[in-house]
Amino acid sequence: MASTVAISTPLSHSSTPQPKPKPKPKPSNLNPRICFLASTPNKPLSLSALKYSKNSASTFPPNLCIERRRNAGLHTHLLPKAASSSSVVSSEYTEEPETKVKFQTSLSLPGCSSSLSLLGTGYREKIFAIIGVKVYAAGLYTNQSVFSKLDAWKGRSSIELQQDSSIFDAIFQAPLEKSLHIILVRDVDGKTFWDALDEAISPRITSPTPVDESALSTFRSIFQGRPLKKGTSIFLTWLDTTKMLVCVSPDGAPSSIDATIESSNVTSALFDVFLGGNPVSPSLKASASNGLAAALK
């Protein structure tokens, strides 16, 4: 019987059906970064006024964003809104970039022997139920003679100065005037403003003396029962390490002094609130450090 031989021929790869290439995804019309900015009515600052509905997209906090990442669909990441790094500057004023509040580059204040120059600006933000609400802008002014007492920090970068609390201690200890100009960016009840300030001052005075208590009482009386409207200016002016002047003006530079605070513990605690190791306005300290670095080149 004749035998049958089977011959197998290997199939060529070219004959194997190839999968069709996937079509390239069409460009999305969605913005990769979508921010929902909610404007808050200009009302006195209170917790109840700042509550928001979790079911309403229009009430997302003004400094939070929803981010869409490429090829990952839409994800709800709550991210802090990036701060602007530049200020508008002219020969007469500097604009704080986040609040758009303008500060004069030079000020003449009651009780000061000479005009003071703007060193830096920043803003104060309060967090209510994860919502960041800007309460005021602030500008730090100093007597220009203070730079002659800061030779030890010449050539330092702004980052180095910001992290070195000793330079701000030296500015405070210098027997020269310096002033903090606060400008409210919303209506705030006077008691609310003082309570927030007292909340920051009190932990910095561990054992208040009768002199400290009297100074704090005087400080408190300026704001109790006093509505503070948007645009109100508050000036805290240190004449030396033991004496500070407080002036409140509805619009612009003050014409008179509202109170004199005489307590080294209170005056130093207040300076530390804004320019110490844990400042209530990090943006102000960073901006002041930039100003110092530029002046001490």
Image (cartoon, rainbow, N blue to C red):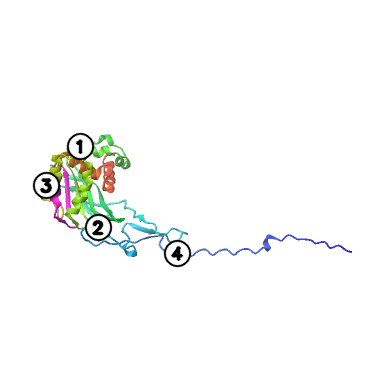
Q: Are marks 3 and 2 in contact (CB under 8 Å)?
A: no
Q: Mark 1 highlights which residue?
A: 173
Q: Nearer the viewer, mark 2 or mark 4?
A: 2
The residue drawn where x is 14% and y is 43% is 213
- Where's the N terminus, which quadrant? bottom right
Horizontal and vertical percent for residue 135?
A: 24, 54
Query: Is residue 226 located in the magenta-colored stretch of the structure?
Result: yes
Which comes sooner in the sequence, label 3 or label 2? 2
Check disc 3 and give the amino acid type.
Ala
User: The magenta stretch spans which residues?
Assistant: 219-238
Q: Mark 2 highlights which residue?
A: 47
Mark pair 3, 2: CA separation: 30 Å
Q: Nearer the viewer, mark 3 or mark 4?
A: 3
Q: Nearer the viewer, residue 161 or 262?
A: 262
Mark pair 2, 4: CA separation: 39 Å
Q: Mark 4 highlights which residue?
A: 28
Q: Mark 3 highlights which residue?
A: 259
